[in-house]
Amino acid sequence: MEVLYAQYLKNPLYTYLYHDHIIPETTIKFDSYMVHEAELNVGDLRLLKTDMPLFLPKNTHIRLLITSSDVLHS
């Protein structure tokens, strides 16, 4: 999986790419935008809530490639 984060936009954007190595040249891509503070519900996590959350499979190995077009903080 590849995750790209663009913070400099008015509405920060995460782009997710799933590369399937079992079926060559198969990629699933979708964008997920951060939810504005005014739209958060009680209990939602600020700066972590998105309109399309990422779901990962359980009980399997997952390789993450994380990039950023801005400063990447640890």
Image (cartoon, rainbow, N blue to C red):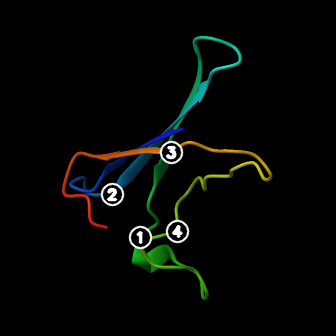
Q: Which of 33 and 29 is in front in this view?
A: 29
Q: Name the residue under label 1.
A: 36
Q: Earlier in the sequence, mark 4 or mark 1?
A: 1
Question: Where does the image place residue 49, in percent across and percent down from the top left?
Answer: 52, 68
Answer with the quarter of the image where residue 37 lies: bottom left
User: Marks 1 and 3, how far apart in space?
Assistant: 26 Å
**Dot placed on the residue nearer the N-terminal end, 2 or 4:** 2
How many residues crowd around disc 2 within 10 Å: few (fewer than 14), some, or many (20 or more)? few
Relative to 26, 34 lies left or right: left
Where residue 11 sits, quadrant-wise, is bottom left
Tell whether 26 sits left or right of 72. right
Q: Going from the N terminus, do you reach mark 3 or mark 4 first? A: 4
Amino acid type for the residue under numbered disc 2: Asn
Q: Three-letter amino acid code at disc 4? A: Lys
x and y, in percent, of residue 61 in the image: 68, 45
Q: Residue furthest bottom?
A: 42
- Sequence-wise, the earlier of marks 1 and 3 is 1
Residue 64 is tagged as 3
Q: Label 4, on which residue?
A: 49
Task: Find the residue positioned furthest to the right.
Answer: 59
**Kind of residue sitting beneath label 3:** Leu
Q: Closer to us: mark 3 or mark 2?
A: 3
User: Which residue is located at x 80 percent, y 52 percent?
Assistant: 59
Pointer 3 or 2: first along the chain: 2
- Gap between marks 3 and 4, in whole Å? 20 Å
